[in-house]
Amino acid sequence: MSSTRPVSDAPGAVPPASPATGRPPSGSIWKDAARELVRSPVFITCALVVLVVVSWALFPTLWTDKGKLECDININRTPPSWFPGTPPPGYDVDLEGYPLGTTTLGCDMYSQLIWGARPSIVVGVVVTALTALIGTVLGLAAGYYGGRTDTIISRITDVFLGLPFLLGAVIFLALLRSQSIWAVILVLVVLGWTQMTRIVRGSALALRDQDFVEAARAMGATNSRIIRRHVLPNALAPIIVLCTIYVGAYIAAEATLTFLGVGLKPPEVSWGITIAQGQDFAVAGFPHLLVFPCIVLTVTVLSFILMGDKLRDALDPKGR
């Protein structure tokens, strides 16, 4: 009897599901991937960074005793005591209480970075969840049923793919005339579901003619049951990898839109707002106004992306 081949050449493909259970065999690529990830210092480091940032978003008061709107304009732009250079004349402030200095509005920079994690994480997670849901449903329908269903979904996907992502987001937010977190989420979801749809469609196309799917169909299983019990479980690996990467990408997108002036607005606190407020003063002798929020944003986004890369490598049988 010949050995079973992967169901797809795409990274993240998993062994075919058993016709009897509809699930990948136990002890399969998932356990192998877990062992690979545990031994990866890059993945562990990135996972720890993500856990810290998520804890900032969920429990900010565990990390700071200052409120997100607790500011004093009289001490604005105070640099950290250990930062290169000396404080400007006229500053008589206890710098030990402001380890990262203060913002342009006199808010504690450290506290602003803690409180700013919440909208970024909310946008990243909610947009990723919604785009994954939409993309998975449409991709499975297009790839499994084919024919007219595939044509209609593919053409609609092509139309949205033709819209430049950043430019489209700026235009849609300007038309909405609303700069709330939910407006940003709505626009990113409208423009962001296409790539997930195409990836899932490709997986469904590769899976629908596999022997275990044909066997389930011959046994009288309905299309919805075949999709739910046989096709979807084998398409989960690339979906999970994409979701991990997308969280970081959407966090960066929210910060970019906010920096351009069409995203979030004060009194909301976010990393994009902090960067936008500090850009004009950073070149005037207050570099900490840009350095710290940019570092936090970059490290967070990079951690999600590297986690996704490591997940993809671990779930790729050919890579091991």
Image (spheres, rainbow, N blue to C red):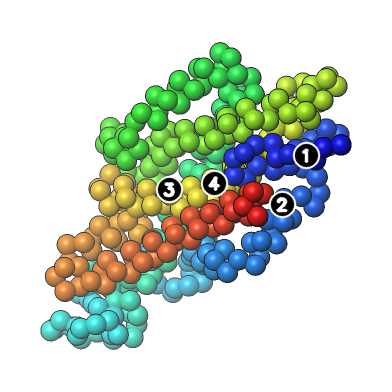
| Distance in Å between CA atoms under marks 3 and 1 | 38 Å
| Distance in Å between CA atoms under marks 2 and 3 | 26 Å
Give the mark nearer the N terminus: 1 vs 2.
1
The residue pinned by badge 4 equals 243
Badge 4 marks a residue whose secondary structure is helix
Give the mark nearer the N terminus: 3 vs 1.
1
| Distance in Å between CA atoms under marks 1 and 2 | 17 Å
Badge 3 marks a residue whose secondary structure is helix
Q: Quadrant of the N terminus?
A: top right
The residue pinned by badge 2 equals 30
Within 10 Å of the Cα at label 2, are there few (<14), some (14-19), or many (20+) other Cα atoms? some
Give the mark nearer the N terminus: 4 vs 2.
2
Mark 2–mark 3 contact, CB under 8 Å?
Answer: no
Within 10 Å of the Cα at label 1, are there few (<14), some (14-19), or many (20+) other Cα atoms? few
- Please report the residue visible at 57 percent of the width from the left and 48 percent of the height from the top: 241
Q: Nearer the viewer, residue 99 or 228?
A: 228
Against 84, residue 115 (above or below) is: above
Q: Nearer the viewer, residue 142 or 106?
A: 142
Label disc, if present, on residue 250 of the rendered structure: 3
Name the spot of residue 185 as percent of width and height, x first.
42, 42
The reply, left or right, for residue 217 in relation to residue 174 is: right
